[in-house]
Image (cartoon, rainbow, N blue to C red):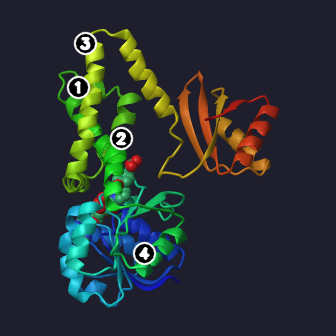
């Protein structure tokens, strides 16, 4: 057991998943859950993510570990509420998507070195406990943002927790964190929301969206996320988001000018550059897997093809880490990407499939 008593404040998607992950592995003796929504608490208790429903501030009394998993804007008021009820030595961590503002406010409010900023790079656009998953953090990066003030013992406890639930710890400063997440998470969310709003505002918007299959769906998936959570993220990381938008604006202007001027060469340059960069992204379905070795398999469109592939690899003792169907159109066959944890498995998979005359190649 890692801690005797743990309190999770906000048992939605992330808090609920952490509760499940900790309890399933017997890492906490007792988990208290706090939330504003009774429904989330009832579900979390029934699913075993928490052992008791409690209220602030008493819920943190006697806790060795307190996990803040409410939207980032709620974190400072919660910290003020619990501050005087924490036992000496208690470690406080959060899962918020922004870090500079959160960590600075936490250190100031708690006036101690027991706060460890955290951010699991895994999640979904489904809010609430209903989408909670004990395996959400497995193989996903889990960013920790200690400062010069952070107590090494507190950091060690949180690192241990991440490790135990299958996450991959990466440490960085709160500033680095916010610059990077502004680029790869907050800007894409902003663009997804703006794209949906723009299309919805077009005269043909509603009818066109009814047809949306590939592009619109892929580029706007995250826009379905929790409005409250994203409002808080944009405001908390406002400076970095605005800075990322400057870069975006420049990219839009350049692309727009090339279209306007019918500049074929410029268009090809921009599109080729983006295509190459995008194709270099490894397959990362739920979180951000640190390393994966992929192959791409082209198969005819027939029932049972995936079962057949899985069967061949399974019989050869090769473990599939990830699988993604890239294209599957009726009658045209499809392309499937399969990810493995090691180069050896990748190589053996290619051999096994080629022996059966299945078209496949190494990716990357
Ligand atoms: N959704 C995602 O994919 C990810 C979210 N995060 C961060 O994790 C945190 C939680 O997000 P989710 O679990 O996705 O949201 P969620 O909406 O599923 O859960 C948040 C929970 O906090 C509760 N809550 C709100 N204010 C509260 C308060 N004052 N006291 C107690 N409970 C309160 C809500 O009722 C809700 O159940 C956010 O800070 C978000 O930025 C981090 C990584 C991924
Ligand atoms: O839905 C997805 O693909 C996500 O990327 C979810 C997500 C949302 C917020 C975060 O801070 C981290 C991950």
Q: Of callouts 1 and 2, which one flags the residue occurring earlier in the amino acid sequence?
A: 1
Disc 1 to disc 4, C-alpha distance: 49 Å
Q: Of callouts 1 and 4, which one flags the residue occurring earlier in the amino acid sequence?
A: 4
> Which mark, residue 221?
2
Residue that appears at 43% across and 28% down = 274
> Which mark, residue 155?
4
Residue identified by numbered label 1: 205
Q: Quadrant of residue 272?
A: top left
Q: Nearer the viewer, residue 95 or 239?
A: 239
Vertical side of 355 occupied by 39: above or below: below
Q: Of callouts 1 and 3, which one flags the residue occurring earlier in the amino acid sequence?
A: 1
Q: Nearer the viewer, residue 197 or 262?
A: 262
Disc 4 to disc 2, C-alpha distance: 34 Å
Residue that appears at 27% across and 27% down = 252
- Residue 23 lies, in percent from the top left, at 48, 76
Residue identified by numbered label 3: 260
For this orientation, the residue located farthest to the front is 148
Residue that appears at 24% across and 53% down = 237
Which numbered disc, 1 or 3, marks the residue closer to the eye? 3
């Amino acid at each position: 057991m890692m801690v005797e008593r743990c309190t999770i404040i906000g048992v939605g998607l992330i808090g609920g998943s952490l509760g499940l992950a900790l309890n399933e592995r017997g890492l906490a003796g007792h988990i208290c859950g706090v939330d504003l929504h009774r429904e989330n608490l009832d579900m979390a208790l029934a699913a075993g993510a928490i052992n008791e429903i409690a209220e602030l501030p008493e819920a943190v009394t006697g806790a060795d570990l307190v996990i803040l998993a409410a939207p980032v804007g709620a974190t400072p008021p919660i910290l003020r509420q619990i501050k005087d009820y924490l036992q000496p030595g208690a470690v406080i961590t959060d899962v918020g998507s922004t870090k500079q503002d959160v960590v600075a406010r936490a250190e100031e409010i708690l006036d101690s070195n027991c706060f460890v900023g955290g951010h699991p790079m895994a999640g979904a656009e489904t809010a609430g406990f209903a989408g909670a998953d004990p395996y959400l953090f497995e193989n996903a990066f889990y960013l920790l943002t200690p400062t010069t003030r952070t107590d090494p013992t507190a950091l060690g406890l949180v690192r241990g927790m991440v490790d135990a639930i299958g996450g991959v710890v990466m440490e960085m400063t709160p500033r680095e964190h916010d610059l990077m997440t502004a680029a790869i998470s907050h800007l894409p969310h902003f663009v997804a929301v703006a794209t949906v709003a723009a299309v919805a505002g077009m005269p043909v918007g509603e009818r066109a969206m009814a047809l949306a299959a590939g592009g619109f769906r892929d580029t706007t998936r995250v826009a379905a996320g929790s409005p409250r959570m994203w409002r808080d993220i944009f405001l908390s990381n406002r400076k970095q988001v605005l800075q990322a938008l400057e870069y975006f604006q420049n990219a839009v202007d350049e692309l727009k000018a090339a279209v306007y001027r019918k500049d074929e060469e410029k268009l090809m340059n921009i599109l080729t550059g983006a295509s190459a960069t995008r194709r270099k992204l490894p397959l990362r379905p739920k979180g951000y897997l640190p390393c994966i070795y992929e192959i791409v398999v082209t198969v005819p469109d027939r029932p049972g093809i995936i079962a057949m592939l899985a069967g061949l690899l399974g019989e050869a003792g090769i473990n599939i880490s990830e699988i993604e169907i890239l294209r599957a159109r009726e009658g045209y066959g499809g392309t499937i990407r399969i990810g493995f944890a090691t180069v050896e498995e990748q190589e053996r998979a290619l051999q096994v499939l080629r022996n059966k005359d299945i078209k496949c190649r190494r990716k990357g």
